[in-house]
Structure formats: C-alpha cells, structure tokens
Image (cartoon, helix red, strand yellow):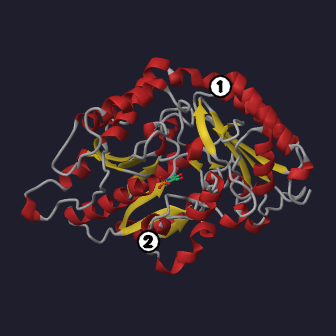
Amino acid sequence: MLSLQEKDRRYLWHPYTQMKDFAERDLLLIDRAEGIRLIDEHGRTYFDTISSWWCILHGHNHPTIKAAVIKQLDRVEQVLLAGTSHEAAILLAEQLVLLTPPNLTKVFYSDNGSTACEIAFKMSIQYWRHVGQPQRNQLVALERGYHGDTIGTMSLGGTPEFHGAFAGMLFDSHRLPSPYCFRCPYGLAQASCDCECLQPYVDLLAKQGEQIAALIIEPLIQAAGGMIIYPVKYLENIVALSRTHGVHLIFDEVATGFGRTGTMFAMEQAGVSPDFLCLSKGLTAGYLPMAATLTSEEVYQAFYGDYQEGKTFFHGHTFTGNPVAAAAALGSLQVFAEEQTMAGLPEKIQRLHGRMARFAELPWVGDVRQLGMISALELVKDESAAPYGFNDRVGWPIYLAGLKEGVLLRPMGNVMYLWLPLSTTIAEIDEICERVWRVLSDPQNIVGW
Ligand SMILES: Cc1ncc(COP(=O)(O)O)c(C=O)c1O
C-alpha cells in the first residue's frame, strides 16, 4: 500500500515546482489548518506567512465563511450564469460595486486572477471597436509586471524567467520600465525623483496615444515580479498620463485587493480609479476560486444593444459566478464587517514594519520594502548589492530552514517576503518575525555568504 507521499510522487505534478526537488524529499503534506497555522501529516505546525499564495485573509477554517459555504451547498452548488442568475452572485456584485469607486458599476465574474485580467483587456479592445475607434488595439504593461500564466496575460507580463519559453507565441505589446526604485535605472532616489521612469510612456503616448487601448498595472506593488513596492506618486502620474490620452486603465488588484496593503484596495492610497478593476485571490478570502472584473457604465453601455448589432461580449467560463464561491466571498465581507478587520490593521502594520526594519542590518539584505501586511527583503550577493542570478536559487535554503523553524517561506528569486493574513495577531507577528530572524540571520542559509 502506497503512502500519501508516494502516491503524490506517482500521480501529482505541482505548479511552479521542479518535481525533482522532491524525488528524495517529502513535500509538506498539509492535513488541516487553523487560523494562520498549517498542520502537516505529522501534526507539526507552520505559520502560513504567504497566505497560501496571497489569498487567505481571515485565517483558515473561519466559522463564518464555512457556515456561508455550507448554507449555499444546501441550496445550489453550481448553475450557469449565462441567462441564469442566483442570489449569491447578485448580492456579491452589489457589495463589490458599493466597496469600489463610484465609476465602477458592473461586475463580470470568472474564476481566477489570469482570467480577470484577460477579460479586462478583451473588454477594452472590443469597447474601442464598438465606439468606432478600432485602431485603439494596442496594450501597454510594465516590466516586472505579472498578470497570470495564460497566453494573453503572459503577453502582458514582464517576468521572462517564468514565461521565456513561450516568447515566440506571445502577442506584441508595449512595455514600460518597472518603477524599481532600489535599482533605479536613472540613479535617482525615490523621495526626490519626479518619476523620470515614466518618460518612455510620455514618448509613447505622444507618438501613438491614439492607438493605445489600455494600460494594465498592479497598483503600488509589482508582486510576483519581485515585490517591487513603488511610490504613490508613480501611480498618480501614470493614471494622469493615461487619462490625458484617453487610454483605459486596468488595475490588477488580484493580489492587493481586500486589505492586504492596509486599505481595502491599493488604489485608494493614490485616490485613483480605473476603467477595469481585476479581483481574485482575497475575493473569497482564499476559500474558493473566484474572480471579478469590474467596469464602468460607459464600457457596459458600449456592449448593450440588439443582438444583431454584434455587441455581445462572447466570453465566459463554466464556473463563472459559482454560487458556493460567491457565498464564500459574501461570508468574507461579513467577517470584514463583524470583526472590523480594516480598523485593526494599522496597529498590526506598524508592528510588522517595526519588526522587519531590523533586517536591514544584515549585510545580505539590500533593501527592506514594506506595504501594509506585506514585507519584502531583497537579498544581495555582496556589500556592493550585486543581484543574485535566477539560478543562484537563494530561496531554496531559506525555504528549508523556514520549515525547521515552523514558518512556510517561499522566497521568489532574490526576494524573501511575508504576505501575512489580515487576521495575524500582534503576538503572531512577533513570533513570525523572530523565527524569520533566526532563519535569515544565519549565514548558512544565505547562498554565498
Ligand atoms: C497581480 C496578479 N495578477 C494576476 C495573477 C494571476 O492569478 P491566478 O494565479 O489566479 O491566475 C496573480 C497571481 O499571483 C497576481 O499576483
């Protein structure tokens, strides 16, 4: 009889994982979870410091969300959303519209972050056709941006280390420099710069502004691209530039949405609003797959007409607006209200930032970047802050040492980060930071030091 670990090796292929790494080594087999702790097959516990891929908000196994899911299962578990509707999808759409800026009035559901983004730029392209500007068919994105792993979102991605194999089949789009302040290509300092890295966008708009349909951007933090946290002024400026040339704005808040950055949505910190808002991950607090693309009345109306006018948006996924997922999302919003989650965040954020600031003393930590419940450390090769290469694989010994300390860390390339659930208590923040300090302050866990 094969053990679960043996069956895993025999039958499973894991995402973003070199399976050979686990040929001899068991992977972390999670048996159950409570709050922000994962419990493995041997009963050992690990802090879920990355919110199970950035989606857990209120902790695992939350009674309110569980109850909402069970209640929905007693009614209907799945029904198509094409020409059919159900209460959970309707009530959730209403709440999302109320939570987001007033210009966003319509909700289009899907089931993961990549599709939320694909839908946004497909809607934009089709919108411009409907309003008689079909020449607006080009898209703009940022270096180090990440919007998913489908062909469309890879085409707008800026992480060749993940998507290089498919370069030949991706469609053309414009790419702007990343606002990567730690390694500013202009040699400027964040506090005093004038966002000189936006000059290529100014030039592009001057030359081809009338051909650009939309710009897609992750507000305030390029997450998968290396936890690149950039200043509010950059977001304000890129929005203003886009607006002067009529370019649609797509905000990808798949990762940042629902409180992670300290405000319900990151865009609030710049007081800006997009034409399309992409949500997933925290939408259901991590309980079930679901995504939403919100857009404006103006966009919606451009698709509205007699069927024969050919304005229908022919896009849909089987599980679009799934009732159980929608119930989980409503359950999560109920928790936000009942537990006053957002009101509790400032104190937690201050504690986290305070605890993580000391990591700057370590010679292998080149930069400490913090935003809300996110804290990221860019590891460097030497005192001159030379960057590690992708194949140096600095994250691997840190991941292994983290497991020994009971913290699940999953550095991305040269960036070690915490992406804490909003429910993490002050005591847990202290405990996690202490354990991470033990991992990171030991040069044995740092490649080359
Ligand atoms: C900002 C952002 N957009 C889109 C995605 C893609 O989401 P999914 O993995 O659900 O397709 C991610 C995933 O990490 C993300 O961080």
Q: Residue furthest front?
A: 1
Q: Residue at x 79, y 53 (%)?
A: 379
In screen coordinates, is 38 left or right of 414? left
Q: Residue furthest bottom?
A: 168
Which element carries disc 2, helix, strand or loop?
Answer: helix
Which residue corresponds to mark 1?
A: 348
Q: Nearer the viewer, residue 121 or 68?
A: 68
Q: Residue 198 lies in what quarter of the image?
A: bottom right
Residue 27 in the image: above or below residue 322:
below
Q: Residue at x 50, y 45 (%)?
A: 236
Q: Nearer the viewer, residue 161 or 229?
A: 161
Label 1 to label 2, Cα distance in Å?
Answer: 46 Å
In screen coordinates, is 363 left or right of 357? right
In screen coordinates, is 342 left or right of 19? left
- Location of the N terminus by quadrant is bottom right
Residue 444: image location, x then y, percent: 91, 51
**Three-letter residue code for mark 1:** Lys
Which residue corresponds to mark 2?
A: 207
Q: Residue at x 79, y 62 (%)?
A: 387
